[in-house]
Amino acid sequence: MPNTPDTLSSPTGWRLDHSYARLPQSFHVRVEPTPVPEPKMVLLNRPLAETLGLNAEALDDAAIFAGNALPPGAEPLAQAYAGHQYAHFTMLGDGRAILLGEQITPSSARFDIQLKGPGPTPFSRRGDGRAALGPMLREYIISEAMHALGIPTTRSLAVVSTGEKVWRQDGGLPGAVLTRVAASHIRVGTFEYAAARGEKADLQALADYTRRRHYPEVEGGYTALFEAVMERQAALIAKWMHVGFIHGVMNTDNMALSGETIDYGPCAFMDAYDPATVFSSIDRNGRYAYGNQAHIAQWNLARLAEAMLPLFHDDEKQAIEIANGLISRFEGRFKRHWLAGMRAKLGLFTEESDDTALIQSLLDWMRDTKVDFTNTFRDLTNGRIEPVEWHQRWSERLKRQPQSASEVTELMRRSNPAFIPRNHKVEEALTAASEQGDLNPMRRLLTVLAAPFDHTQDWPEFSEPSGLESYQTFCGT
Ligand code: AMP
Ligand code: MG
């Protein structure tokens, strides 16, 4: 996609284009943010702002990040989409988010600039279109941590408080608006929406747009596009597994075609290794449990394939056959990424057929002894050895590859984080910020999480597991 917006760069660095708005009418609705009484900057991501080409003047403006004023060239809209939420199909759309446009960066990359919590849209149904400060800060912390961990993700540019209360089950909470930056907000649910409306031309326009925007290198028909999407999802979920990340609400509207992690509601990082780990208060059957994420990704991709059937073949029966063939290859793709990452976590450069068994026996030991996932790999990295018998096998395996001990350590340090967002540290930072207005714990936490692979630091309070045995998370409404 040529990244030359019709608008020139403004003095503040805003350079917004609107390629999504040029999709057929059914995909978007123009809507203005609703002003808030008292916008105050709470967090601002200066390094990200710089990448986007925004200068200090642009950043001084809490009014813009609250939706009270629009940046030059903005054409705000809400996106239409559908989604399977816990396996139930629903028409959704941006009920509490407004896209201001796509910022073209100095290096000609294109990023959606979206306000989350800017007031009602035509898709708000009975919701208020608003967001509470706690969950928006939580998204900021976790998304920035994911970025530092090297995992594709939407980013957080700013959080402003609104001076207004939002009313939720637990009473009045301080309101906030988050500015989310994303490669795009095209979701599996966007395709489901187009398919449900039954306009093949619109579906095709969306698929062509997705290819131009995210997969320009992909040649061939729509099946090739689908395979490329599937490949990125397989890689993404494997990366989550490697750091113990549990998304928590992998509904199809929360799966981005770009391959970025999106929608930080009830997500959290696992402490003790257990594939059945679930934090979300509403996930009673463990649908989105840690160990079920690859399976759910495949399920979601099956919904995408279903939506794309008319693009695969004019004859439905043949289209279904093609889709089934494609989907059946997800598991193999995921396993390949998973195994590659696990080998790196154990310092393995070469491949042996017994590697899966070696990895699995470590994981089994971890589950049986309920040890911390992150710290076990951290200890192995730093020569603090635990499972004695297994360790023998691992050392022998390491000896069968040509790499030196220091090369092994180097690889392990790059592959095993020393610091992840520990649940109790996240909660502590959120409580201080939203109840006492004290941002210091948050700033400290963000600093630690910005360098997760720094094995030279020893900060026990940031590396100890939370001990919050029945930790629960909630959808960020
Ligand atoms: P999420 O749980 O953030 O993935 O949201 C699911 C759907 O509910 C999306 O369509 C949101 O736009 C909508 N939604 C969530 N919270 C609100 C709210 N406070 N007001 C209006 N719509 C909302
Ligand atoms: Mg969502």
Image (cartoon, rainbow, N blue to C red):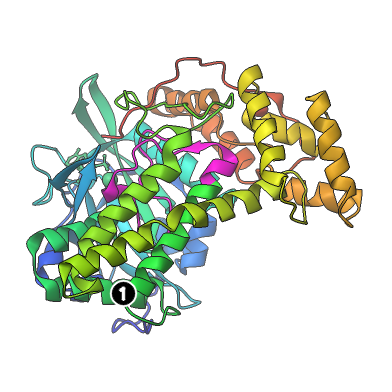
From the image, give the main secondary structure of the stretch colored magenta: loop
- The quadrant in which the C terminus is found is top left
Residue marked by disc 1: 222
Instruction: Judge by depth and name the residue closer to the eye, 100 or 61.
Output: 100
- What is the secondary structure assignment of the residue under circle 1? helix
Residue 447 percent across, percent down from the top left = 61, 41
Q: Is residue 417 visible?
A: no
Residue 44 percent across, percent down from the top left = 46, 49
Q: Is residue 455 magenta?
A: no
Q: Is residue 55 above or below residue 403?
A: below
- The quadrant in which the N terminus is found is bottom left
- Magenta range is 240-268
Q: Is residue 322 above or below residue 95?
A: below
Q: Is residue 70 left or right of residue 181?
A: left
Q: Is residue 454 visible?
A: yes
Residue drawn at (13%, 76%) of the image = 201
**Picture quadrant of ligand 1:** top left
Instruction: Judge by depth and name the residue closer to the eye, 272 or 178.
Output: 272
Instruction: Judge by depth and name the residue closer to the eye, 18 or 244.
Output: 244
Q: Residues within 10 Å of mark 1 (few under 14, many from 20)?
A: many
